[in-house]
Image (spheres, rainbow, N blue to C red):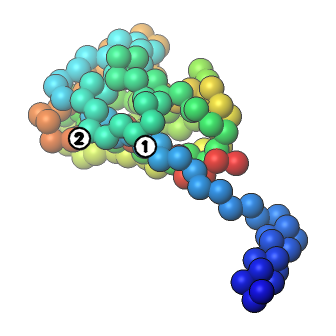
Amino acid sequence: MLLLISLLCFAIQVESYGYVYHRSPALAFTAMLYSHKTIGARAVVRYDHVVTSLGGAYRSTTGIFTAPFRGLYSFSYSLMSYPSNEVHLEMVKNGKRVFKVYFAPHTYPQSSQTLYLILNRGDTICIENSFFERKATLYEDTGGYNTFSGTLIRII
């Protein structure tokens, strides 16, 4: 009887605060470049070495993540290039720029970005070379310098 009363009180509390607990499915990916890549102007970066793939939402053949659920997602991407090469990469949601990372010439630092985005089912996320008229060469020696990761935090 005490258990029933406790569950009823919890249900009332959940209803009054507007919280509904449900378990979100496991959905996560991490992909990286496995070799040097030259990316065409406005082209999508295809991270070809998939390290983790739960849920099948990232396609290494296209470089595109497609959200299978409406929810809160976290995405990260990193960039490293040759010292002689200036690179601008941007995260693109449904064809529109969300954020950009930049790699200055004559250096070897990395740039990275982590974002939290609310996506609808079917929304797409990818990383593109943001130059309109110039190719970009990304450095890689299997060290994980150029990566793209995402995970579903919670279905909403």
Could you tell whether 2 is left or right of 93 in the image? Answer: right
Helix or strand or loop: what does disc 1 sit on? strand
Specify whether 137 is left or right of 55.
left
Task: Kindly give the residue lying farthest to the bottom in the view shown.
Answer: 2
Q: Residue furthest left?
A: 141
Q: Position of residue 144 (x, y in %)?
A: 21, 41
Find residue 58 and report its image quarter: top left
> At 45% from the left edge and 15% from the top edge, which residue is drawn?
42
C-alpha separation, residue under disc 1 versus residue under disc 2: 19 Å
Q: Amino acid at mark 1?
A: Ala
Which residue is at 80% across, 71% downward? 11
Task: Please rate how many residues cluster around mark 2, counting C-alpha atoms within 10 Å: few if below 14, some from 14 to 19, many from 20.
Answer: many
Residue at x-position 31% and y-position 40%: 52
Rendering coords of residue 148 (x, y %): 37, 37
Residue 150 visible in image? no
Q: Mark 2 or mark 1, which is nearer the start of the sequence?
A: 1
Tally of numbered tags: 2
Viewer-nearest of discs 1 and 2: 1
Q: Nearer the viewer, residue 140 or 110?
A: 140
Give percent across and percent down for residue 126: 47, 27
Q: Which mark is residue 28?
A: 1
Residue 49 location, quadrant = top left
Q: Dot 2 lies on which element?
A: loop
Q: Position of residue 98 (x, y in %)?
A: 58, 35
- Observer-nearest of 91 and 53: 53
Front residue (pair 133, 12):
12
Residue corresponding to mark 2: 145
Q: Is residue 21 visible?
A: yes
